[in-house]
Amino acid sequence: MIAIACACLAAWVWLVAGQGMFWRTDVRLPRKSAPEHWPDVAVVVPARDEAEVLGVSLPSLLAQSYPGRAEVFLVDDGSTDGTGDLAKALAERHGGLPLTVTSPGEPPAGWTGKLWAVRHGITLARESTGAEFLLLTDADIAHRPQSLRDLTAAACGGGLDMVSQMARLRVETGWERLIVPAFVYFFAQLYPFRWINRPRSRTAAAAGGCVLIRSCAVTAAGVPDTIRQSVIDDVALAKAVKRSGGTIWLGLADQVDSVRPYPGLGELWRMVARSAYAQLRHNPALLLGTVLGLALVYLVPPAAAIGGAAAGAWPLCALGLGAWALMAGSYLPMLRYYGQPWWLAPLLPYTAALYLGMTVDSAVQHYRGRGAAWKGRTYARPDTGA
């Protein structure tokens, strides 16, 4: 146990010092001066059964304070709750940017529904506007009035091909407070923002809720066609753009918020479990390694600290406390970003245990034929042709 506890402490020292400073929350949108010419922007919003949140998110897009020409294209992906009609009614009521509502029909074999909708929206936007930039944003994302302006200024001023922001997720219920900040923390640990933003780094990721991308970068990367089967489409998009020579940037948002509620554990569990095994490429060996890694890094420290104290094994207790303290300390900046109390930091091992269960459940659901299910669609592994 002493050896295992030493390994845990060493792992946390390495994570805090050597994993791209993933725990810091100061990677924010670069502030750039206004470009000499504001480029045309087409906003593409794929939406499937989003009537619950559209009344908050869509008016925020229509009300963008953008000096150039911008137009919104909402792609109604087979909704059954009146999403398309509601979008038109909201545009008539609120005015603002021009809105086009369209529908792509059911996706053909080999496409996920969202990417098929995005493809349809990009094609229509290009034909209608010839926009230099495309803003790909989800139907549950609300943008502050300056969001599009600041995104475009950052892309133009920094010579970036793609700028993405991790939207601030909702944290109102007890379960949201416990799980949501950890979701972003774990994502940043897996994909450190500083590494992503280095042009020569191989690390690539994006946050699908808010992606501003140059039209020429879309063409160069061949997206979304080249990633048409991807369940985790934002990471696949970033990898495709970076692989084609594009420069990308990802950071935390100040003006972009998710309005989708996850009030209970069940909703949060399904949100994570639907794509967790896809993140592991449906590989049982990677699943086993992930489970062992989570247990070693997150569960052993409190077990060693508490068990060592109970048994009077003080060296073991000290090692466990040291690893637990590094873990909790690295989580504090994310809790501050979300405006949450400090005492949630020592509870991170409990949250990690929940994520471990979600990951295992994701694999179980996959092998039962119910993996990657979202709003009435289930996506099999890409190589199954389903």
Image: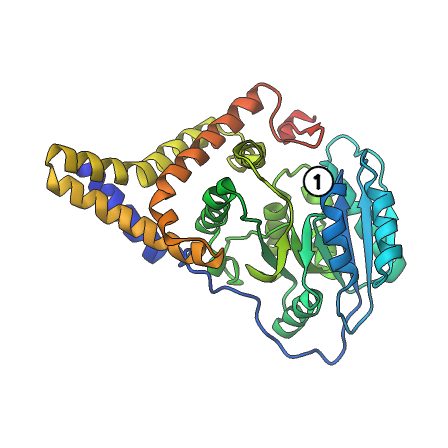
Height in image: 234 above or below 255?
A: above
Height in image: 172 above or below 249?
A: above
Residue 347: in sight, yes or no? yes
Count of numbered circles in the view = 1
Q: Residue at image x 17%, y 45%?
A: 318
Give amino acid for label 1: Arg
The residue nearer to you, when weighing 328 against 71, is: 328
The residue nearer to you, when weighing 148 against 344, is: 344
Residue on which the image places disc 1: 228
Residue 350 in the figure: left or right of residue 248 = left
Q: Badge 1 local density, few (<14 within 10 Å), some, or many (20+)?
A: many
Where residue 348 sits, quadrant-wise, is top left
Q: Residue at image x 69%, y 48%?
A: 140
Residue 343 in the figure: left or right of residue 33 = left
Q: Secondary structure at mark 1?
A: loop
Residue 248: in sight, yes or no? no
Q: Residue at image x 57%, y 66%?
A: 29
